[in-house]
Amino acid sequence: MSKNLFITGTGTDIGKTYVTGLILKKFQKNGQSAAYYKAAMSGNERRLDGSLIPGDALHVKTVSGISQPLQEMCPYIYETAVSPHLASKIEGNPVEMQQVLDHFDNVCSRYDYVTAEGSGGILCPLRFDEQQLWLEDVIKARSLNCLLIADAGLGTINSVVLTAEYMNAHHMSLKGIIFNHYEQGNKLHEDNVFMCEAMTGLKVLCCVQDGAADLDIPFEVLEALYE
């Protein structure tokens, strides 16, 4: 079975998929058997034949160069650009926990390292009807270590600390932070690194600048996050 890591974020559109693509690229460049997984993906476009394109998965595959087929990467794909729990109410096909886990386990059986990406922030609901399913249910079901992606700019202290405190209170293993949209020499961004480390006790493992093509972190440090 594989070693795994779950990528979460302080919210939507802070760069989880972008950073995840760079993470998978690092594994690919180091000759490792690596794969991507996302339980539910919304806001996707359609092909000419009407089928949905898993946009985040396609981005990760394109950036990283991994050979994993797209159809392995995500069991639930929606067109509507809202949380998966609402997208499934609109479109049908609600997320089933057993299918999520079976699909994840199948990917894990075929690759040495699997990077799972969450939808939105840590509190994004996957399903909320007669059943309730949250990202943390998936994390706990497979005892996944987590990595937090955050925006480097204004407001990140609040969002990072609240996310870290929630995950700690709910017994999820958060191993570190990566800042996205980081500007070298920006006093606010530099102070955010200092404050977030001081207030959470977590290490900011890497700061990613806009347009970065590689992740500035030793492969051995990155690989050690996976269990």
Image (spheres, rainbow, N blue to C red):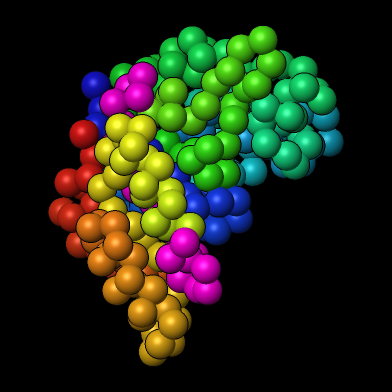
- Total label count? 0
In the displayed structure image, the side of residue 29 where residue 51 appears, left or right: right
Residue 25 or 146: which is nearer the viewer? Answer: 146
Q: Can I make out residue 207 in this image?
A: yes
Q: Does the magenta segment cover residue 144?
A: yes
Residue 87 percent across, percent down from the top left: 74, 30
In this rendering, position of residue 120 left or right of residue 50: left
Query: Residue 72: x and y, percent?
Result: 50, 26
Residue at 55%, 51% (x, y): give it: 11
Instruction: Give, as a single range, the part of the protein colored magenta.
Output: 140-158
State whether residue 209 appears in this view. Answer: no
Is residue 122 positioned above or below 213 on the image? above
Q: Is residue 72 above or below residue 180?
A: above
Q: Nearer the viewer, residue 112 or 66?
A: 112
| Left or right: residue 78 compared with residue 182 | right
Residue drawn at point x = 77 percent, y = 22 percent: 89
Q: Quadrant of the N terminus?
A: top left
Instruction: Name the residue: 29% across, 26% down.
Output: 143
Residue 90 in percent (x, y) is at 82, 25
Q: Quadrant location of residue 4?
A: top left
Left or right: 105 with respect to 70? left
Q: Position of residue 44 (x, y in %)?
A: 72, 40
Q: Is residue 13 magenta?
A: no
- Residue at 16%, 54% (x, y): give it: 220
The quadrant of the rendering that contains the C terminus is top left
